[in-house]
Image (cartoon, rainbow, N blue to C red):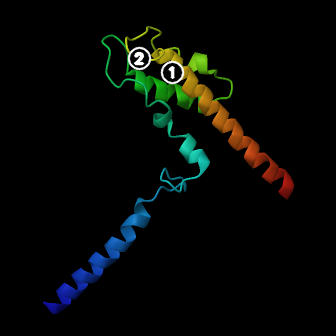
Amino acid sequence: MKRFATAALITGAFLMTASPAMAAPKDGHTTGPKADHVSKAKAYGKLCKDQSKKHVKGVKGTPFSNCVNALAKVAADDEVTPRDACKPLSKKHVKGEKGTPFSRCVVAAQDLKRQLKEEEEEEAPAEVATA
């Protein structure tokens, strides 16, 4: 009985120490406070936080989900403009809200493009200096 308890204790201890390592993302990117700027820039939800998460009848997705998808398109392709990416969002004003879902999405997409451009400029001189 003592052997069984010892084996169970050792196995449990091994599993407790191994589980965080196995749960870590394989690509090395994290979204925590110590994440690099690229990972933080990909947190599109933060840029779209002012969008509504309520479904509108007859419209695919929510303004929030459409904004997040638009930002993903902008980040993935340099040719996509913020205006084109945010087309699915409504241009109707909502009483008590500042701007329209479309205009807020365009502003968020422009901010993302600016962030990505700044990160590229920060990385470029470092690459040139090492070459």
Q: Residue at x 52, y 22 (%)?
A: 105
Q: Which part of the image, by quadrant, shows the N terminus?
A: bottom left
- Looking at the image, residue 113 sits to the left or right of residue 85; the answer is right
Number of numbered discs: 2
Where, by quadrant of the figure, is residue 96 drawn? top left
| Residue 131 visible, this angle | no
Where, by quadrant of the figure, is residue 58 drawn? top left
* Viewer-closest of 57 and 26: 57
SS type, badge 1: helix
Label annotation for residue 37: none
SS type, badge 2: loop
- Looking at the image, residue 99 sits to the left or right of residue 75; the answer is left
Where, by quadrant of the figure, is residue 14 drawn? bottom left
Q: Position of residue 20 (x, y in %)?
A: 40, 65
Numbered disc in front, either 1 or 2: 2
Q: Which part of the image, by quadrant, shows the C terminus?
A: bottom right
Q: Position of residue 123 (x, y in %)?
A: 74, 48
Q: Which residue is mark 2?
A: 97
Q: Which residue is mark 1?
A: 104
As shown in the figure, which amino acid type bears the numbered disc 2? Glu
Neighbourhood count class around disc 1 (C-alpha, 10 Å): few under 14, some 14–19, many 20 upward: many
Q: Position of residue 49 (x, y in %)?
A: 43, 31
* Viewer-closest of 81 and 23: 81
Q: Position of residue 22 (x, y in %)?
A: 42, 63
In the image, is residue 83 above or below residue 70? above
Furthest-top residue in this view: 92
Q: Residue at x 29, y 82 (%)?
A: 10
As shown in the figure, which amino acid type bears the numbered disc 1? Arg
